[in-house]
Image (cartoon, rainbow, N blue to C red):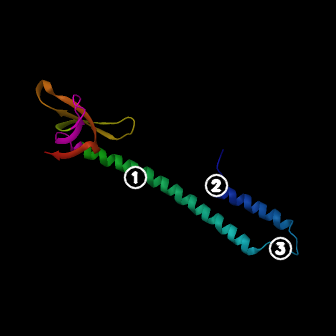
Amino acid sequence: MDIASASDIQLDYMNLLVTQLKHQNPLEPLSSDDMTAQLAQFSQLQQLELVNTNLEGVSSNFGAILNSANRSYATGLLGRTVTFFAENEATGQLEEMEGVVDSIFNDPDTGGSLLGVNVGEGENIQEYTLSLGAIVLVRD
């Protein structure tokens, strides 16, 4: 079902109004105050539709700017030591971990930036994938 725009509704109203004026009782004419109030409401509806359309555009632009800023921030974390919390598989408890950011990639589901973080040294290196929000501390 298509939703009619304010312009479509206003056009329908004008057609109805013209028909009503053609067939009105001359002894009881339609109040011009009522017509003016209804036309003003349609004008307000059109303005609200315009504001809504503009806000949708701003929201879309803001999302793109935010994603770009997050990518820039993530790029700045490459090679830096970060602290985060991860679940210990043996105990099931959260524990503080520290590792070096070695990669950045985009989450295909959200479009957000994800970090590849290496924890440990030598053969004991574990790689974690983190969102930017998981980082609680950044060091050089």
Residue 57: % across, % down: 47, 53
129 up-or-down from 39: above or below:
above
Q: Which span of residues is magenta-colored?
A: 75-94
N-term mark: 1 or 3: 3
SS at mark 1 in the image? helix
N-term mark: 2 or 1: 2
SS at mark 3 in the image? loop
26 up-or-down from 44: above or below:
below
Assess whether residue 117 is covered by the magenta stretch. no
Quadrant for residue 6, please give it.
Answer: bottom right
Q: Which residue is mark 1?
A: 62
N-term mark: 2 or 3: 2
84 up-or-down from 56: above or below:
above
For the point 16% across and 28% down, which residue is it?
A: 125
**Few, some or many residues within 10 Å of mark 2 (<14, 14–19, 20+):** few
Q: Which residue is mark 3?
A: 29
Residue 9: % across, % down: 69, 57
SS at mark 2 in the image? loop
